[in-house]
Amino acid sequence: MTHEHGIKANLNQFVHLLLQVLLVGLTIGMMRTVVPALAESEFGVPKNSFVLLSAFVMAFGVVKGVMNFVAGRLSERIGRKSVLLLGWIVALPIPLMVWYAPSWNWVVAATVLLGVNQGLTWSMTQTAKLDITRTQERGLTLGLNEFAGYVGVALAGIATAWMATLLGARTGLLVFGTVVITSALLLTQVWVRETLPWAKAEAARQTAGSQPTADMPRYPSNISNHPSTWEVFTLMSWRDRRLFALSQAGLVEKFVDALVWVFYPVYLYQQGLSLTQTSTVIGVYGLVWGGAQLFTGRLSDRVGRHRPNVWGMWLCGVGVALMVSGQGVLWWSLSAALSGFGMALLYPNLSAAVADISHPNWRGSAIGIYRFWRDLGYGIGALGLGLTAHFAGHVEAAFWFVAFAMLASGFVLWWLGEETLPRLIFYKETT
């Protein structure tokens, strides 16, 4: 059997994988608006307990980061589909745990399972698409992947807010979550194909030297052909300057998402917005983030990854700062939209840059380790913004903490990073 690469050649499977990541986004999205906004009234979290409120996102980030690491390596041994199925099986108890939850500890435990689910499933939808598409389609591929996922996050936040209003928070989340997770499990089993053979076919072609010179990536030279887990981890984390710059940017940009998850609902709710109004403002962030990736990913296939990544970091930080610099639904919505657009510039293109310079033999591991550092940013960010708000005595301090971190990290990326798109590197070297 030949394993032809390209979106068009694998359109049926590509669409199935897009549907999978939409369901992944719906799963995490159900926990992002209703749960933090009603933490005090529904789950007994004391008012202004900023560190306790952040605990469930800290747990999520640490667990998801570790599972990204595990998923990448595991997928190279047992295949992408098996890891995806495992991720959906793990998610089955989550809606029931939140529905029953007698205390906030149950919500934290459910979020730990959510972290396992997200680490396994979102990693595999991304890796599987990269397996079956071409080098010059990676920006578009990851843009579509993240578009589907974060539109799912936004839609789930809005849908669960309405269902919580109609059915009650616990029942609404139970119904929504059960339908989404069981549907995803069934669709994975029936329609998703194993894509690891495509990655092996790409590696074989590169070894045979059949790729055009302009499409040949500039892989790191200080790594073996079939590296150990530790070898890939150290390369991603500090031995390669480009990969370090991308990994630290990925970690810090998750501070924004931790802030949106934990403190945006609390802040807007405290400003007098209703639950549905709060979900709408936060939904603007998610919809702009998701929708704009339809063209920001493709844009990076043309202009490169480096500039969109750096500007995305800076725009996102400015949007966070603006959120607490004005008043009114329109102001908050525009601020959320600016942060969402910044995320759209950087989010698919940081991953695409990692994929550009990761060999097919160890690309699954590299993406998993990048995602380990990126999603560890949930835990580090949630701890940092929780402590900042606690010692400052007000939630606004967390916004300034995140805004500064994004601006500083963007500078590090600009300074240490470089362009990774093979076509642009080839053009620069030959002109």
Image (tube, rainbow, N blue to C red):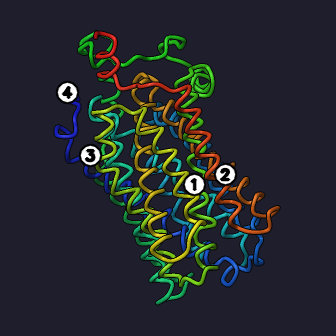
Asked whether disc 1 touches disc 2, contact meaning CB atoms under 8 Å apart, the reply is yes
Asked whether disc 2 touches disc 4, contact meaning CB atoms under 8 Å apart, the reply is no
Name the residue tied to disc 2. 381
The residue under the point 53% across, 53% down is 318
Q: Quadrant of residue 232?
A: top right
Name the residue tied to disc 3. 14
Residue 50 in the image: state x and y as whole percent: 75, 67
In the rendered structure, find residue 423 and report the number of the disc placed on it.
none
Closer to us: mark 3 or mark 1? 1
* Mark 1, other Cα within 10 Å: few <14 / some 14–19 / many ≥20: many
Q: Secondary structure at mark 3?
A: helix
Q: Residue furthest left?
A: 8
215 sits to left or right of 49: left
The answer to whether residue 177 is seen in the rendering is no
* Mark 4, other Cα within 10 Å: few <14 / some 14–19 / many ≥20: few
Name the residue tied to disc 1. 256
Closer to us: mark 3 or mark 2? 2
Q: Quadrant of the N terminus?
A: top left
| Mark sitting earlier along the chain (1/2) | 1
Q: Taking 311 as reference, is 48 above or below it? A: below
- Three-letter residue code for mark 1: Val
Q: Quadrant of the C terminus?
A: top left
> How far apart are the two marked residues, 1 and 4, measured between alpha carbons?
43 Å
The residue under the point 35% across, 48% down is 145
Q: Residue furthest front?
A: 326
Q: Secondary structure at mark 1?
A: helix
In the rendered structure, find residue 2 and report the number of the disc placed on it.
4
